[in-house]
Image (cartoon, grey):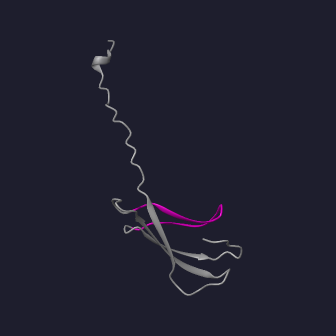
């Protein structure tokens, strides 16, 4: 027996929804004492939506020195993260 298209269940496809990213501001602070190049340093990162931005940012934070990745971590449910890094001896700014 041959089937026709009317005999088949065809799943309905919903359109892809693209949610534009909300502009954010990043705050990076030293959570400890001053550190010299090559020493460990604890950094606190807070990502906040710019007003009137909705919600709490989520996802990953990547610290870069130019084009070199220094560290990467995940934001918590409050949009915050803590990173401990070894301050590179040739760091031009984090």
Residue plotted at (40% across, 44% down): 18
Above/below status of 42 relative to 18: below
Residue plotted at (34% across, 33% down): 13
Residue reaching furthest bottom? 33
Q: In which quarter of the image is residue 75?
A: bottom left
Q: Quadrant of residue 51?
A: bottom left
Residue plotted at (63% across, 72% down): 93
Q: Where is residue 78 in the image (x, y as percent from the top left)?
A: 37, 69
Count of residue discs: 0
Q: What stretch is highlighted in magenta?
A: 57-76
Q: Quadrant of residue 80?
A: bottom left
Question: The N terminus is located in which quarter?
Answer: top left
Q: Position of residue 42 (x, y in %)?
A: 54, 79
Say whether residue 36 is left or right of residue 15: right
Q: Is 74 inside the magenta-drawn segment?
A: yes
Q: Position of residue 89 (x, y in %)?
A: 70, 76
Residue reaching furthest top? 1
Q: Is 44 inside the magenta-drawn segment?
A: no
Say whether residue 61 is left or right of residue 13: right
Q: Which of 20 and 1 is in front in this view?
A: 20
Main structural element of the magenta stretch: helix, strand or loop?
strand
Above/below status of 38 relative to 75: below
Q: Which of 81 and 55 is in front in this view?
A: 55
Q: Nearer the viewer, residue 44 or 93?
A: 93
Question: The C terminus is located in which quarter?
Answer: bottom right
């Amino acid at each position: 027996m041959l089937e026709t298209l009317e005999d088949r269940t065809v799943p309905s496809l919903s359109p892809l929804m693209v949610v534009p990213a909300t502009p954010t501001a990043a705050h990076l602070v030293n959570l400890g004492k001053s550190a010299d190049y090559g020493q460990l340093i604890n950094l606190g990162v807070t990502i906040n939506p710019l007003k009137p931005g909705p919600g709490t940012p989520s996802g990953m934070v990547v610290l870069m020195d130019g084009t070199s990745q220094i560290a990467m971590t995940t934001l918590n449910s409050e949009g915050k993260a803590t990173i401990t890094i070894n301050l590179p001896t040739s760091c031009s700014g984090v």
